Amino acid sequence: MAASPTLSNFELMVMLAIIRIGDDAYGVSISTEIEKTTGNEVLLGSVYDALSRLEAKALIVSTLGETTPERGGRAKRHFRTTSRGLRLVRDTQRSLVKLWNGLPQLKGGEI
Amino acid sequence: MKLRREPAIARWLLNLFCSSSDHDSVIGDLMEQYQQGRGRTWYWRQAAALSLLGLYSKIARRPLIPAHRFPVGLIVVAFIGSTALATALFSDIGLIFLTCIVAGVCVGIFRFVRGEELTQNAKPAQVQELQGVFSAPSTGREPLDPKVTSNGPRLVRIDSSHIPVAGGIGAGILILILMIAVLHDVPYLRRMAIPGLLAGLFFAACLRLWRRWHPRTISKDWLSIKR
């Protein structure tokens, strides 16, 4: 039986950003979404690197969009999650919640 | 709408290392963000990271040293490298050594980039021949789609002259030896340096002429396919 793919921390963030954004998910909007939620600057290159890995695992699909002069005539690449991707995110969430539950060290907010 | 000019060197780096169609969207995103008011430093940081990733993906996609040559090549490079390092550490030619390594790496990068151009401009006949190599039974690969090949697919090939790191270090070491010979008091080497250089140039010119008269064809002999 083939092992199901796993998600790294950053890949999970990218997947969640795509789900949050919906139809307009492309490189810039995904990195902005991650920057907004984490407060850290994100490199577009690393976002695209993660996106290509996710696409290779068939967790997301991409389509080419419109071109504009300010993009130098280059097309936008829009991303959306596949049903397989959604299932994997849900499984990951379930596993993480199980791991988080019942840890007294993580309750109360302050260490 | 008036567009802002992007930093020229950063743009050049992107053209150099991220020229494939895979990078079109990300470069478009970068330009879009820059036009919307992001700073030059931001652009530079993103371009540098993209260039590194682009370079890494090029290298990762194409193993640089043929598998059957790897141990010998590695041993030779290690031997020459350690000799050169020892010379640099135990004599006063550290600066020359550094200059030569930088020069060698530059030569290596240049050759790698040029090799990339040659690959992308491969003629259909060469592509067809490569297709035969790719579809060898041992690899279990299906022959490439003719429609795809006519558009010039990305070819996997190794030519020893396109090995960036080892080639660069090799060129650097050669320059180093010549410079040591010329600048330092090593009489035998110094005597050999100029005739050696002239002989090398003569040999290179002969090879070039020979290649012009006998256009080379791609064969399995100088290709090593590994994915």
Image (cartoon, rainbow, N blue to C red):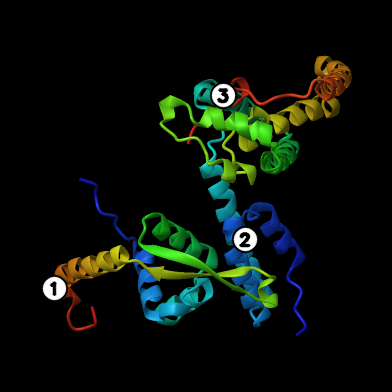
Output the chain of dot 2: B
Q: Is residue B65 visible?
A: no
In the structure shown, which secondary structural element does the residue marked by tag 3 occupy?
Answer: helix
Q: Is residue B210 above or below residue B44?
A: above
In the structure shown, which secondary structural element does the residue marked by tag 1 occupy?
Answer: loop
**Quadrant in the picture for residue A1:** top left
Q: Is residue B151 above or below residue A9?
A: above
Q: Pointer 3: what residue?
A: B73
Q: Amino acid at mark 3?
A: Gly
Q: Which mark is residue B48?
A: 2
Residue B25, image x, y percentages: 58, 66
- Confirm whether circles 1 and 3 share one chain: no
A3 lies left or right of B93: left
Q: Are marks 3 and 2 in contact (CB under 8 Å)?
A: no
Q: Earlier in the sequence, mark 3 or mark 2?
A: 2
**Quadrant in the picture for residue B194:** top right
Q: Pointer 1: what residue?
A: A101
Compare residues B29 and B193 and report the one nearer the observer: B29
Residue B16, image x, y percentages: 69, 53
Q: Amino acid at mark 2?
A: Ala
Q: Amino acid at mark 1?
A: Asn
Give the class, few, some or many, for how many residues have Cα within 10 Å of label 2's Cα (few <14, many ≥20).
Answer: some
Output the chain of dot 3: B
Q: How many marks?
A: 3
Q: Is residue B207 visible?
A: yes
- Confirm whether circles 1 and 2 share one chain: no
**Quadrant in the picture for residue A10:** bottom left
Q: Is residue B99 above or below residue A9?
A: above
Q: Quadrant of the N terminus of chain B?
A: bottom right
Residue B140, image x, y percentages: 41, 31
Alpha-carbon span between mark 1 and mark 3: 54 Å
